[in-house]
Image: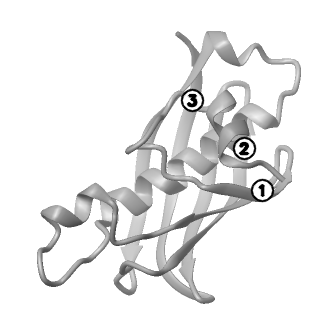
């Protein structure tokens, strides 16, 4: 549904910190599905961990947050994206279930739990090969730049 060039029109993040390769589904105001291909070429693997590369949990959470940001922006087509930014206000109930390694495709699934005005609360899950590897509850707010 959205390729990386279209994602860059929505989010301010850029390589190496843009953590979404493609959005596959959006149901405005309700949910989004996206993914990132994890490769050995990721800069993070130079230090995490040499000889035993594991994709950091904080990067998984950031990817989920970026997908949530795309959902928030795409849920209001009339919004001037150039004047807004998403700030995450809390990350709660986070659990890491299994490690993510080079060669994995990290699938993000976000569902809106609550949306009122500029505030968003979302259920965020990440999967590899259909197996849950991370889950969290994310809260965010859209604010003027």
Q: What element carries label 2?
A: helix
Q: Earlier in the sequence, mark 3 or mark 1?
A: 1
- Identify the residue at image location x=23%, y=66%: 45
Q: Where is residue 112 in the image (x, y as percent from the top left)?
A: 72, 53
Q: Position of residue 83 (x, y in %)?
A: 64, 9
Near-viewer residue (86 or 6): 6
Q: How crowded is mark 2: few (under 14 residues within 10 Å), some or many (20 or more)?
A: many
Q: Is residue 11 left or right of residue 99?
A: right
User: In the rendering, which numbered label is found on residue 31?
Assistant: 1
User: In the rendering, which numbered label is found on residue 71?
Assistant: 2
- Identify the residue at image location x=48%, y=64%: 136
Near-viewer residue (54 or 71): 54
| C-alpha span from label 3 to label 1 | 16 Å
Q: What element carries label 1?
A: strand
Q: Which of marks 2 and 3 is nearer the N terminus?
A: 2
Q: Which of marks 1 and 2 is nearer the N terminus?
A: 1
Residue 105 placement: quadrant: bottom right
| C-alpha span from label 1 to label 2 | 7 Å
Q: Position of residue 34 (x, y in %)?
A: 67, 60
Near-viewer residue (104 or 33): 104
The image shows residue 21, relative to residue 135, as above or below, that is above
Contact, CB < 8 Å: mark 1 with mark 2? yes
Q: Is mark 3 on a helix, strand or loop?
A: strand
User: In the rendering, which numbered label is found on residue 141?
Assistant: 3
The image shows residue 59, relative to residue 9, as above or below, that is below
The image shows residue 145, relative to residue 52, as above or below, that is above
Coloring scheme of the render?
A: one colour
Residue that sits furthest to the front in the current view: 41
Q: Nearer the viewer, mark 3 or mark 1?
A: 1
Residue 55 placement: quadrant: bottom left
Q: In this view, does 3 lie to the left or right of 18?
A: right
């Amino acid at each position: 549904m959205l390729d990386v060039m279209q994602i860059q029109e929505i989010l301010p993040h850029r390589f190496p910190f843009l953590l979404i390769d493609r959005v596959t589904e959006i149901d405005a105001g309700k949910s989004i599905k996206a993914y990132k291909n994890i490769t050995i070429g990721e800069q993070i693997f130079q230090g995490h961990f040499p000889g035993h590369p594991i994709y950091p949990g904080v990067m998984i959470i950031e990817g989920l947050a970026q997908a949530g940001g795309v959902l928030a922006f795409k849920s209001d087509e009339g919004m001037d994206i150039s004047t807004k930014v998403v700030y995450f206000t809390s990350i709660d109930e986070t659990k890491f279930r299994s490690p993510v390694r080079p060669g994995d495709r990290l699938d993000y699934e976000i569902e809106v739990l609550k949306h009122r005005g500029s505030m968003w609360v979302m259920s965020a899950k990440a999967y590899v090969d259909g197996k849950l590897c991370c889950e969290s509850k994310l809260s965010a707010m859209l604010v003027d730049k």
